[in-house]
Amino acid sequence: MLSLRHFALPLVCLGGLLGQPAIAKKPSAARHATVVTDDAPDVVVYGRRDDVARFAHQVAEAESISEAWALQHLSQARYLPAVAKLVMPAPAGTAKNWQAYRARFIDALRVRDGLRFWQANEAALNDAEARWGVPPDIVTAIVGVESVYGKVTGNFRVIDALATLSFDFPKGRSDRTPFYRDELQAFLAWCAAEQRDPLSVKGSFAGAIGLPQFMPGSIRKYAVDFDGDGRIDLDHSGADVVGSVANYFARFGWERGMPTHYPVAPPVETTARASLLAADILPSFSATQLTEAGAVLDDQARAHEGPLALVELQNGAQAPSYVAGTRNFYVVTRYNWSSYYAMAVIELARELRQMRPPAPQASAAPPRLQ
């Protein structure tokens, strides 16, 4: 994720002193009676809006936290025009290009830093593989693609980003307001539970946090305290990052020892090819069904017992690339619903695996003296 300038408008701070978690009386209706009458977002202070006050009340009831505390922090959230712009889809007609996409993520910097991350967290990576079956190279590659091993974690205040997308989701694309309100609720609940200041947490323009770029809801569901220090730290604890990513994959069905994909030549007949591509990245066909439809698989793929998907990766004006994706390929796409993303993770993992120095062999024992 690219580093982006933090566009922030001035705020007006309402409420008491920051960080007061004590249960307080419900805010009076008069305090929040102001109604915004135009179509522009309230860029001055979210605390003047009735919908924000209602949301704070709902969060407090659902999460058993102080309503005053929730409203106090929401009141200091700022509308960010940059967030509203960045969440919009790419312009229509933009050609997909796997080779260009690959080049963005498989580079010397990520390989170098990935090898360092692997070495620094080798014990945690091995423990995670033993527990969840997710290989060290896949976990390491996720962190590289997501944040370049912590170099690019986002500089937006998470509360600003999530408030913008919860209360002023931009028009012009499918409305995801409910999703972002769920994430904002999860964020406030997480901060309250871990006694974090909601105004100090930084992340991406979409509200993703830390080296693995977990959304707040994913932190609550899948993040783990893998170093055993009593808290989950996705910004500084390599062990927590490793354990959380591996647990995420395992919870979505990662199967130990299964390849992510096999080489495949698609059917030459266009109708048969279109029929196989209709399922997209969801594994839906046996190896026999793919072969009968005209796809060409190697011996290893033909012996695969689970379902497969014919995955197409467009290359701009050049011919597309194809792979036969397994259930594990599909699991990688649960991190980001894109076959291009999944292949970037898998290709970076392969580079790291090939470039990693061989483990040192134990030296031979000296001969015994007679």
Image (spheres, rainbow, N blue to C red):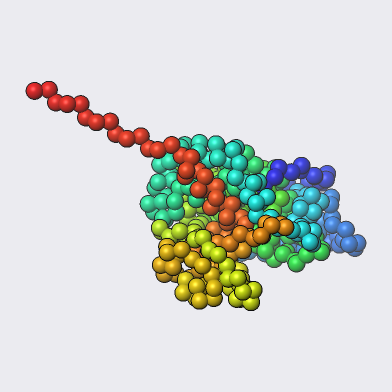
Is residue 262 found left or right of 274 in the rendered image?
A: left
* Residue lying at 53% horizontally and 52% vertically, measured from the top left: 346
- Residue 65 is drawn in which quadrant? bottom right
Q: Is residue 282 above or below residue 27?
A: below
User: Is residue 60 visible in the rendered structure shown here?
Assistant: no
Is residue 160 found left or right of 304 in the rendered image?
A: right
Q: Is residue 221 above or below residue 288?
A: above
In-front residue for pair 58/146: 146
- Residue 268 is drawn in which quadrant? bottom right
* Residue lying at 47% horizontally and 49% vertically, measured from the top left: 243
| The C terminus, quarter of image | top left
In-front residue for pair 186/288: 288
Residue 194 in picture, x, y percent from top left: 56, 48
Q: Is residue 22 above or below residue 93?
A: above
- How many marks the image carries: the answer is 0
Q: Residue furthest front?
A: 268
Residue 290 in picture, x, y percent from top left: 51, 72
Q: Is residue 99 above or below residue 30?
A: above
* Residue lying at 84% horizontally and 50% vertically, measured from the top left: 44
Residue 338 in picture, x, y percent from top left: 62, 60
User: Is residue 83 visible in the rendered structure shown here?
Assistant: yes
* Residue lying at 20% horizontally and 26% vertically, measured from the top left: 366
Q: Residue furthest left?
A: 370
In-front residue for pair 168/363: 363
Is residue 232 found left or right of 44 in the rendered image?
A: left
Q: Residue furthest right?
A: 38
Q: Residue furthest top?
A: 369
Residue 18 in picture, x, y percent from top left: 69, 44
